[in-house]
Image: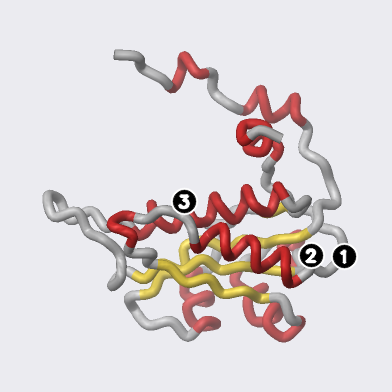
Amino acid sequence: MTFLELAKKRFSSRKYLDKGIERSKLELLLEAARVAPSAVNKQPWLFYVFSSPEGLEKIRPCYHRDWFKTAPVVIVAVADHKAGWVRSSDGKDHCDIDLAIAIDHITLQATDLGLSTCWVCNFDVDACKKALQLSDSFEPVALIPVGYPAEEKESIRFETERKSLNTIVRWL
């Protein structure tokens, strides 16, 4: 499969099979995140993996949708703002950008392994910080439920939801 085929195959799954995920596959997801590029190679991130019933019970209250409770694994992507690179000209903190790249590596690696994910940003950040016992410099950026998909993405729908190249590209 080409990279473009892999990227088009990835979708936000909201329905998972009641099936555990092999630790070796989870480790590949995390390795994909580990090798992601970051500004000045600061790697300002932490990843919390919730896979035990006790762990999942701690993180599930952070997001209110019922489908979220069906994911056998949830990875919480956390930015470490003390460790990130900040552009001196305007003070732009690149933690979010760096973490977004790492999360994308996770989602694409998951797709390559036959797993599916969903990038959840609309969650209770304060509840998540409390569940993880995070200090102020650490920010939970996204919840990533992971599982074997119980649904397939409709490729036709995918194509109609994406803007055309001539809408998003300016050749100069």
The residue at which mark 2 appears reads as 70
Residue at left offset 62%, top offset 66%: 63
Looking at the picture, tell me which residue is in the foreground, 2 or 153. Answer: 2
Of circles 1 and 2, the one toward us is 1
Residue at left offset 33%, top offset 75%: 137
Q: How is the image coloured?
A: secondary structure
Q: Do the residues under discs 2 and 3 have CB atoms within 8 angstroms?
A: no
Residue at left offset 57%, top offset 63%: 31
Q: Do the residues under discs 3 and 1 have CB atoms within 8 angstroms?
A: no
Q: Which mark is residue 124?
A: none
Q: Which mark is residue 101?
A: 3
Q: Which mark is residue 18?
A: 1
Q: Earlier in the sequence, mark 2 or mark 3?
A: 2
Residue at left offset 51%, top offset 66%: 77
Q: In whole angstroms, how far apart are the C-alphas of marks 2 and 3?
A: 26 Å
Residue 115 at x, y percent in the picture: 75, 54
Instruction: Give SS at disc 3.
Output: helix
Q: Could you tell whether 148 is left or right of 8 in the image?
A: right
Residue 166 at x, y percent in the picture: 47, 14
Q: In whole angstroms, how far apart are the C-alphas of marks 1 and 2?
A: 7 Å
As shown in the figure, which amino acid type bears the numbered disc 2? Thr
Q: Could you tell whether 87 is left or right of 26 in the image?
A: left
Residue 73 at x, y percent in the picture: 71, 69
As shown in the figure, which amino acid type bears the numbered disc 1? Asp
As shown in the figure, which amino acid type bears the numbered disc 3? Ile
Instruction: Give SS at disc 2.
Output: helix
Q: Do the residues under discs 1 and 2 have CB atoms within 8 angstroms?
A: yes
